[in-house]
Amino acid sequence: MIVALVGLPGSGKSTVGRQLARRLRVDFADSDQVIEREIGCSIREFFEREGEAAFRDMEERVIDELTRAPSIGVLATGGGAVLRAANRAHLRSRCRVVYLRSSPDELFRRLRHDRNRPLLQVADPMARLRELYSQRDPLYREAAHYVIETGRPSVATLVNMIQMQLELAGAIAAVPKDSAPDPG
């Protein structure tokens, strides 16, 4: 069973996903990293050169493949993966989906100096985050089995919250306490 993380850019999908995979002792995949390996350049470069539609086509194919991969235990998706109905359907039916919900204000605090997120390279990134949240929050909720409010908890706390939700739902067996992730 794959645990897939969805949420806006900067919500912690990759960071939390790596720690969750370590905790659960399973393999981790990040769909954006898989795409970058395939295209041989950054997503930002690909976005600028080929456009968003070409990127979303590639992302849809990669999400389809990754949600079928028996070796993957935790999957971090790109922030816009939910824009395609096929991606939402694959995630929802093949994975346990956790929506890491972050407010636009919280995301802006985390991302204001990040130059590698193509959708935020605009004159007013805060307005863009609010627009993305308004557009995507219903889609994240449609795909998600669980919603975790990220707020300001540490990565370890978020991992604990996700693990607890999955255990309570019977989606995973209780994980021994000695498998806690390294601090930091």
Image (cartoon, grey):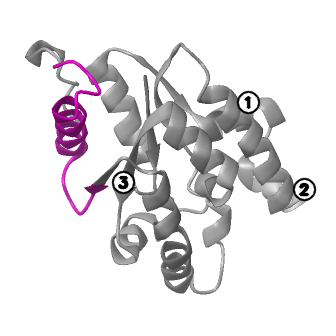
> Is residue 160 part of the magenta span, yes or no?
yes
Look at label 3 and name its amino acid: Leu
Asked if 76 appears above or below 50 in the picture, the reply is above
Viewer-nearest of labels 3 and 2?
3
Q: Is residue 180 left or right of residue 4?
A: left
- Mark closer to the chain start, 3 or 2: 2
Look at label 2 and name its amino acid: Glu
The residues colored magenta run 148-174
Q: Residue at 35% x, 40% y: name it.
A: 16
Q: For residue 50, which numbered disc appears in the image?
A: 2
Residue 110 in sight: yes
Q: Is residue 105 left or right of residue 139?
A: left
Asked if 157 appears above or below 103 in the picture, the reply is above
- Front in this rendered view, residue 131 or 143: 143
Label 1 crowd bin: few (<14), some (14–19), many (20+), radius 10 Å: few
Please name the residue that numbered disc 1 is placed on.
Answer: 37
- Mark closer to the chain start, 1 or 2: 1
Q: Is residue 104 left or right of residue 134?
A: left
- The picture places residue 28, in percent across and down from the top left corner, at 47, 24
Q: Residue at 43% x, 45% y: name it.
A: 13
Q: Residue at 82% x, 36% y: name it.
A: 39
Distance between mark 1 and mark 3 Cα atoms? 25 Å
Asked if 96 appears above or below 119 in the picture, the reply is above
Look at label 1 and name its amino acid: Arg
- The picture places residue 85, in percent across and down from the top left corner, at 66, 54
- Front in this rendered view, residue 74 or 40: 74
- Mark closer to the chain start, 1 or 3: 1
Mark 2 element type: helix
